[in-house]
């Protein structure tokens, strides 16, 4: 996985979180690799990429973190992870990926993205799709905020 694909997602995630969380501190944790078949923390927004590159970006967080961020972004305390909270987390994923893809397009990479798909539940696992190489690894970038931790999980490869 080329660093040119990763940096726009990492930089944009950091910048957008700083923007939408206002006065909250956002710190980047240590990057690490994971196989693409992996459990998620409870709430995951997934955006697919297709074109010159293929893959996906996953924004993974606990229910508590998702609710905290959705509450902050809406300016009110949300009591449960309802439709408004789900739409807010999807919009956060949309904001980040749209800006990252714009940066990548400026660098000459051409591809499209799918609208964010939101998954929420206990003991879920995101696995590589049939036809994809099982040994594709994802780069995980933890972003630690005052509202909880979000893992930006990027698995992108050049189309063969």
Image: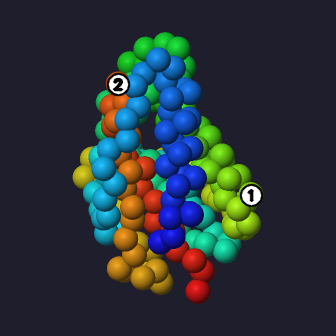
Around disc 1, counting alpha carbons within 10 Å, would you say few (fewer than 14), some (14 to 19), or many (20 or more)? few
Image coordinates of residue 97 in percent, x first then y, are 60, 49
The one nearer the camera, 84 or 38, is 38
Q: What residue is shown at x 49% (from left), y 24% (from top)? A: 21
Q: As displayed, is residue 156 above or below residue 9?
A: below
Residue depicted at x 45% and y 54%:
58
* Residue 83 locus on image (x, y percent): 51, 31
Is 79 situated above or below 62? above
User: Is the Cβ of the residue at disc 2 closer than 8 Å to that at disc 1?
Assistant: no
What kind of colouring is applied to the model shown? rainbow
Extreme bottom residue here?
160
- Number of on-image labels: 2
Vertical placement of residue 64 versus 131, above or below: above
The residue located at (61%, 72%) in the rendering is 53
> In x, y percent, where is residue 50?
64, 69
Helix, strand or loop for disc 2:
loop
Q: Secondary structure at mark 1?
A: helix
Q: Is residue 121 above or below residue 21?
A: below
Q: CA distance from mark 2 to mark 1?
A: 32 Å
Q: Is residue 33 left or right of residue 159?
A: left
- Quadrant housing the C terminus: bottom right
Circle number at residue 106: 1
Which residue is pictured at 51% across the width and 59% down the height? 6
In this rendered view, identify the residue nearer to me: 126 or 140: 140
Q: Nearer the viewer, mark 2 or mark 1?
A: 1
State which quadrant residue 66 falls in.
Answer: top left
First in sequence: mark 2 vs mark 1:
1
- Residue position for label 2: 146
Q: Is residue 4 visible?
A: yes
* Residue 61 visible in the current orientation: no
């Amino acid at each position: 996985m080329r660093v040119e694909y990763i940096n726009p997602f990492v930089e944009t995630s950091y910048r957008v979180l700083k923007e939408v969380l206002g006065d909250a501190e956002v710190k980047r944790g240590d990057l690490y690799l994971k196989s693409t078949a992996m459990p998620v923390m409870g709430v995951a927004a997934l955006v697919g990429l297709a074109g010159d590159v293929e893959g996906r970006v996953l924004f993974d967080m606990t229910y508590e973190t998702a609710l905290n961020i959705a509450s902050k972004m809406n300016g009110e305390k949300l009591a449960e992870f309802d439709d408004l909270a789900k739409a807010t987390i999807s919009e956060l994923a949309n904001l980040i990926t749209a800006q990252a893809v714009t940066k990548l397009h400026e660098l000459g990479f051409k591809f499209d993205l799918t609208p964010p798909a939101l998954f929420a539940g206990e003991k879920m696992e995101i696995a590589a799709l049939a036809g994809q190489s099982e040994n594709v690894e994802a780069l995980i970038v933890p972003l630690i905020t005052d509202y909880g931790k979000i893992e930006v999980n990027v698995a992108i490869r050049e189309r063969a």
